[in-house]
Amino acid sequence: MCTALSFNQFFGRNLDYEFSYGERVAVTPRNYDFHFRHLDKHESHYALIGMAHVFEEYPLYYDAMNEKGLGMAGLNFVGNAKFYEAKEGKNNVAAFEFISWILSQCASVKEARVVLENTNVCATPFNEHFPVAELHYMISDENESIVVECMEDGMHVYDNPTHVLTNNPPLPMQLFRLNDYMYLSNKQPENNFGLDLTAYSRGFGAMGLPGDLSSGSRFVRVAYTRANATSDKNDLSQYFHIIGSVEQQKGLCEVEPGKYEYTIYTSCCDLRNGIYYYTTYNNRQISGVNMFNEDLDGETLISYPTIEEEMVHMQN
Amino acid sequence: MCTALSFNQFFGRNLDYEFSYGERVAVTPRNYDFHFRHLDKHESHYALIGMAHVFEEYPLYYDAMNEKGLGMAGLNFVGNAKFYEAKEGKNNVAAFEFISWILSQCASVKEARVVLENTNVCATPFNEHFPVAELHYMISDENESIVVECMEDGMHVYDNPTHVLTNNPPLPMQLFRLNDYMYLSNKQPENNFGLDLTAYSRGFGAMGLPGDLSSGSRFVRVAYTRANATSDKNDLSQYFHIIGSVEQQKGLCEVEPGKYEYTIYTSCCDLRNGIYYYTTYNNRQISGVNMFNEDLDGETLISYPTIEEEMVHMQN
Amino acid sequence: MCTALSFNQFFGRNLDYEFSYGERVAVTPRNYDFHFRHLDKHESHYALIGMAHVFEEYPLYYDAMNEKGLGMAGLNFVGNAKFYEAKEGKNNVAAFEFISWILSQCASVKEARVVLENTNVCATPFNEHFPVAELHYMISDENESIVVECMEDGMHVYDNPTHVLTNNPPLPMQLFRLNDYMYLSNKQPENNFGLDLTAYSRGFGAMGLPGDLSSGSRFVRVAYTRANATSDKNDLSQYFHIIGSVEQQKGLCEVEPGKYEYTIYTSCCDLRNGIYYYTTYNNRQISGVNMFNEDLDGETLISYPTIEEEMVHMQN
Amino acid sequence: MCTALSFNQFFGRNLDYEFSYGERVAVTPRNYDFHFRHLDKHESHYALIGMAHVFEEYPLYYDAMNEKGLGMAGLNFVGNAKFYEAKEGKNNVAAFEFISWILSQCASVKEARVVLENTNVCATPFNEHFPVAELHYMISDENESIVVECMEDGMHVYDNPTHVLTNNPPLPMQLFRLNDYMYLSNKQPENNFGLDLTAYSRGFGAMGLPGDLSSGSRFVRVAYTRANATSDKNDLSQYFHIIGSVEQQKGLCEVEPGKYEYTIYTSCCDLRNGIYYYTTYNNRQISGVNMFNEDLDGETLISYPTIEEEMVHMQN
């Protein structure tokens, strides 16, 4: 499945799956025409950068940010996601366009909230070969995060004080579950048991934190990790450590005999500087693409392949 | 605290602590004189490479391998480690010399077992400023791992089928504890509960795996992760993913107000090729030092500083 | 807090609290006038038996059944329960009358569903000294159980396939939480870990079952216990064993210094035979009151004190 | 498996198994001849009362106390128990005689320690049909408890500050395991998580307490329950509540298809008054046999059947 994280100026996600559809770091300049299915032409819009499956020069974004510092990611929400029929009087946006729709016009979460009010996310497929993915979304700027869940009973927009998202169940249940873990601490526990006991190692304060890869357990773990992580000039590194706490190692989640879900890539949008950082499963080094190094006034999609081989720095 | 891991040809550890003593990747060539405190001069010996605090050209190794492909690491074992007085008729080795003593003469775990039989690890400090560290040790070649624990009741040498080590309690108790987790699986569980239930996400098979940073929980988690990890041509990457499962993120283990234990570095000895790989907390990229690129017949210690700043690869 | 359980012909609850308001086993005969606050007089109704605080000959039932074999219990639902203003066109029933209202006229869960459709549970207090308790309700006959939760967003009537109820959170979240425990089994687990491990005792199949007294953990534990419990001619005994799995021992839940919540009584309605069984914290022996041994055509409440001292049977 | 508990003046156990060998409450008077296999006749001894399988007038005690207030119980210790060959110069006692041997001559745990120093527990079977049971033992008076474990490496006598015992692993590992649970509390937890969270029910302080029936989990649960239980004039009731926390409900531990281990009986020796209390799975009421109501100077075993049917007290 997947995990999204916002941590100060950094926003991104783990993409966990058993195979890659082939993705590239794609920069959409301001005058690229998205050809929204149900909407008129956007003359010009904010430039975007993010990870996308690029099909015939069209970017199907998994996660991205825009030049104003707003980020958005779509994560699996299988069995709960439900998109709608087009409705008159609404801005009808196909689910596959949703990230581009928001990021092309909103400079902040605050603006996104307003646009969402009149947005209807439609179950329009990209084409006959690409079924509509069942997703929910996290939208973050440097200051706040919200989650959008389109379900049977309508579209929900939730504040997300944890700044993390995984998959099922819906966010309100994930948030509620955290209550069970309120006692977790980065300090050694007191001995309340009523017998003479001792903490025989450091790190005793989080006994009970789940370590498995289910979406519920990953939510608790990454929320706890983020809530306790220090922040300093090395926040880019720290971001990767936080989201690394819920990385899926290859072999630990078998989806069919011999096929394993694992963290295909981890992305990290520097919302302040327009740089899209990422690592891949077989390359720990952080790679980066800076949107501002491209001609953002163009009309044509620019994209870079991901680096999939371990880039080792030999010191001798 | 710390975690050691052996995974096929790769051996190394996380060093977890709240500050660094200053460590370098140190190559000890064959004719370097270790000046063993209680022993005669070793005329010549196997060359070593590893992470060490280097004091006046002397390498105090935390973990290392030799040119034959044997690796050894010392990990905190506070409250349980007990070193001894020098004994006549034994090879008396100061605890700070123990890694060098074994690696300078043993080409395999099998040879190490023989040498250990007549070894007495002594509580001789390096100097008045460096007290004797309370450690236990994992020794691994490509095929097997053993653990050496010097305790009040004598030196124990244990087979270690898990190929991992953390800290307290002693290995037999850590191994026994794994029994409680035998049900963990990388497959989705069956529904045995007696009600109509569903696995609402992937990765449900390891419900109950602990996620905290205590030494007992890290042992279970890394042992489980290693036992299920796939192996292929990307084993170097995979090694870092496995040991990353028990990384200590800064902020999650407070040892005094505002001071946090974290994974200062992660090392990975390529036992087959003599390359010492490592990452540091603020540099995800794997750096490497190849012992065979040095003059291994020299007498002088060679060492390289660790890289502590994030080395990002910009693609544009 | 509390736990309710339906198991074949037996229905009842643990009442967990830090002190008793004084309760008696109260039989309401068919011609007793309930004086419903917002409703006309019920000329005659089903007879009831249950545990009640009796105030000036009025039974404030905590849990009860009627002569037709329908049972109902109210359990704490603090922070979530919300009762309503009286509404025209509805049967307005004060919360304190709700159990009597349902049991006086419904012979089955099926009939209760119909009555509930036109019922509006009101926040009318019994008197100025008895504030409205925040409760939710389980209603069971021998075949099915439902739960009624009156909340901010309206009254919910849920099927309850677990046949158990505790307290917060609302039932849908409690039911969802069970998914995390689908792997629990009354059989020994397979060893999936990838190492040579052994189940060193019996009862290994439910590793991970929570043992604490929070309402979420009690829900999982009693649902699991009920789902696996055998059933035979000793079902009365078995009922007490099942609900005993979530008993609150005195001392384990401190609500203020020196005050402890504990299981004040455990009740068990024999829905088939009209016998109200119960035990108290200090008397393990099951006591019983048979409604059919009373004159059920009367107009006056009949009640029996609970037995609070250990009734030991000496064999010599 | 089984659980033993000492709580102030009360001592006893749960006997958990899938079938009963047939047991009776047996009083051994002072002049009964035990015919110790390897020892001379004990002319006279303390009188005993306890639960035993009685074979041809010989009591094979599972648990018992003597007239001086010392209690002793044998619990399964399969795979770890090892009894010995008879040794010259030792008091050689067959394992099946061990409880009678200690209780017939020791008035306190202190005296038992002395007798144990020269005792050698032998693997002598009772007869060809009764193989030697693999057991370990708890011995308690009102003030202290010890555990005796005869293993491959010799007989161990451990202080037992928990006053509880279950089965595998050996006591030192069980005690060590408690360290992981030192944070458990009967008070509500503080919120340390770093987010705004709430304890939505009472009883939140013991999140993480295991609820399953394995011997390791039962040890933690009953030790925690005992350590927090209040004590007052109702300690007899409280004893049954504490040990009830690890009762095995029928159906939850399948040992072969359709066969379940469950708590066949729970015993409670009143060490101060010589009364042996017990309950059985199908009779919650406490039954009792008072040794001092028998002629304790006799030579003949006296025994009472256990009551196996629910003794309900009808109030009308």
Image (spheres, coloured by chain):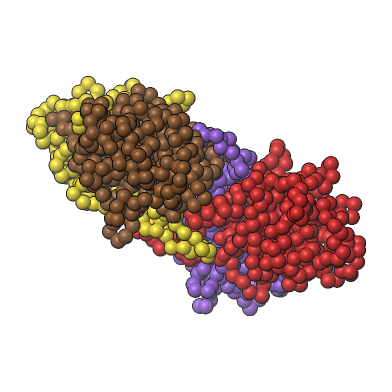
Chain colours: A red, B purple, C brown, D yellow
Residue B286 vs D172, above or below: the answer is: below
Residue pictured at 76% horizontal, 70% vertical:
A68
Image x and y of residue D63, in percent: 26, 36
Whether residue C178 sits left or right of residue D58 in the image: it is: right
Say if residue B184 shows up in the picture.
Answer: yes
Residue pictured at 70% horizontal, 44% vertical:
A260
Q: Quadrant of the C terminus of chain D?
A: top left
Say if residue D71 shows up in the picture.
Answer: no
Q: Quadrant of the N terminus of chain D?
A: top left
Can you tell which quarter of the image residue C284 is in? top left
Image x and y of residue D61, in percent: 25, 32
Between D236 and D170, the one lying in front of the other is D236
Residue B268 vs B254, above or below: the answer is: above
Between D122 and C144, the one lying in front of the other is C144
Residue pictured at 23% horizontal, 37% vertical:
C301
Residue pictured at 30% horizontal, 44% vertical:
C60
